[in-house]
Image (tube, rainbow, N blue to C red):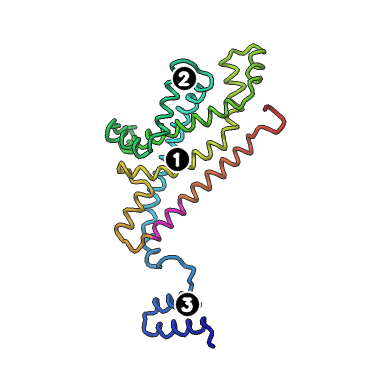
Amino acid sequence: MSDPGTLALAAAASVATDLPAGDGLAALAAAGGSADWWVVGEPADWGFVRRNADYLGVGALLTIGLTFASILLGFVVGFPAGAVEVYGDGLLKRAVSTVGIVLRGTPIVVILIVMYFVVGVPQINLGVASISSAMTAGILGLGLRSAAYQSQIFRASLSSVDEGQLEAGRSIGLSRFEAVRYVVVPQALRRSIPGFQNEFTIVLKDTSIVFAIGLAELLTRGYDLFSEQTTAVLEVILFISAIYFVLTFTTNRALDYLGDRYAIPEGESA
């Protein structure tokens, strides 16, 4: 009895004689021949991606800027909010907790649409440059949603510092605020790095949702390209995915380094 693999190669070779060269290679590759079966996509489509790499690069820069601005806003709002939830009381604590619950429970696309179409965030003129209303709405939407999550990261890290640390600070003459600032906060920030790392990655990927308000970041520009030439859909998506992977990997490794560099040595404060 003939080997099925040999018959398949013979059949593919016979078909290849009636096909263009590229199709013959594809048939041989499908049958287990010597063609580069592992190459994903078509050379012409990859050429299209290379020709438009600068267009996607601008989208990547916009994604990076949007991510950092949103994370910064989230930190500026989220850290005080987390401190209020730990050390505050009364109406302020309840208000902060309620706003956080609402933001965490609302889909990010809804927050962005409300910021852009309902609130109507204006364009910001910085003199040498201006920030469009869509960019401003994106930063506010992503930043406030991130603040709601960062507040819980910092709430947990502040709560993890032993109460005795606060009492020790008070015993040497520090006020409650000074004890929190100089004794508790430095330890809490170091402990919050792993959670902050996860939040950074989430915000980076959530920037793709700003397409809902017409902001042309990386994914939106990719969609513009493969809607223009549909045969390059796979190649464009793979290229965009590679950019997201590089950004995520780089930031994660940088935060891993910070986490190791500033980790509280084992055996010290618990």
> Cα distance, mark 1 to mark 2?
26 Å
Q: Earlier in the sequence, mark 3 or mark 2?
A: 3
Q: Does the magenta run of residues contain 235? A: yes
Give the CA distance from mark 3 to mark 2: 67 Å
Q: Secondary structure at mark 2?
A: helix
Residue 203 circle label: 1
Relative height, residue 43 to residue 267 (above, below)? below
Region in magenta: 234-243
Judge by depth and name the residue closer to the eye, 60 or 168.
Answer: 168
The residue labelled by disc 2 is 93
Most extreme residue toward the front, as rendered? Answer: 1
Q: Is residue 129 visible?
A: no
Q: Amino acid at mark 2?
A: Lys
Sooner in the amino-acid sequence: mark 1 or mark 3:
3
Which amino acid does the dot numbered 1 rest on? Val
Residue 39, image x, y percentages:
47, 67
Residue 147, position in %: x, y?
A: 45, 31
> Residue drawn at (49%, 39%), measured in percent from left and top?
200
Q: Position of residue 226 (x, y in %)?
A: 33, 58
Mark 1 or mark 3, whichever is nearer to me: 3
**What residue is shown with label 3?**
31
Graded by Cα atoms within 10 Å as few (under 14), some (14 to 19) or many (20 or more), the crowding at tag 3 reads many
Percent of width and height locating residue 5: 52, 81
Residue neighbourhood size for the residue with mark 2, other residues' Cα within 10 Å, grouped as few (<14), some (14–19), many (≥20): some
Q: Residue at x 53, y 36 (%)?
A: 196
Q: Secondary structure at mark 1?
A: helix
Separation (CA) of disc 1 from disc 3: 44 Å
Can residue 6 be seen here? The reply is: yes
Q: Which residue type carries mark 3? A: Ala
- Return the mark for residue 222: none
